[in-house]
Amino acid sequence: MRKIIESTFVTLDGVVSTPERWSAPYWDDEHSAYAAALLRDADALLLGRATYEQFAGSWPKRSGDWYTDTMNALPKHVASQTLTETAWNAEVLPGDAITAVKALKEQDGGHLLKFGTGSFSRSLLENGLVDEYHFWIFPVVAGQGTRLLDGLAQTQLVLVEATTFSSGIVVHKAVPHQHS
């Protein structure tokens, strides 16, 4: 059974939107090594429509390093009710996205790495489908923007690891709380 691993950039004030505006000054070798470790165990990406469109507009224009070439080569599974055509080695999840994700998880293979946070992430969380979260907390206050899972009912997670980078990024690795 495959695992879904969500990797999400978030500011100190909980903003997840427009990470391209606030995250880049903190990217360094530690950031790159951690991101590469997540990607190394994945054999496909799982994306919502908005993240797919943003990524598909920029990643294919790059090449020449392991991370970029791997991102471009991996299959992408996209949750969307409006996309009719895809590029960048992507396919729209058929039918109901949650049912399609459950079927993907049942397949053999490596992890499904999920980037971006929006309504698709909320649906995955509400349906108990994410196995592991990597919340990259950046030492920046955005002041405004879409907040991480704003309005979601209280959800218990267990912090299993915290990794601090010299840039100030702290990655919290958390898993869903298992009720006994």
Image (spheres, rainbow, N blue to C red):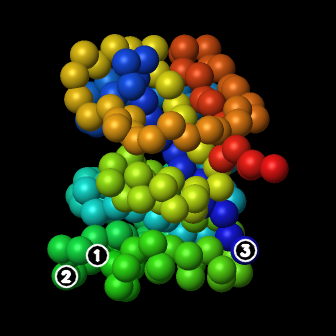
The residue positioned farthest toward the right in the image shown: 180
Please say whether residue 34 is visible from this viewpoint: no
Query: Which is more foreground, mark 1 or mark 3?
Result: 3
Residue at position x 61%, y 69% in the image = 43
65 or 107, nearer to the observer: 107
User: Where, by quadrant of the figure, is residue 26 drawn?
Assistant: top left
On screen, residue 16 above or below 180: above
Instruction: Report which residue position mark 3 lands on.
Output: 1
Disc 1 vs disc 2: which is toward the camera? 2
Q: Amino acid at mark 3?
A: Met
Give the amino acid type for the residue marked by disc 2 in the picture: Thr
Pick whichever of labels 3 and 2 is earlier in the sequence: 3
Residue 90 in percent (x, y) is at 37, 76
Q: Is residue 68 above or below residue 107?
A: above
Q: Is residue 117 visible?
A: yes
Q: Secondary structure at mark 3?
A: loop
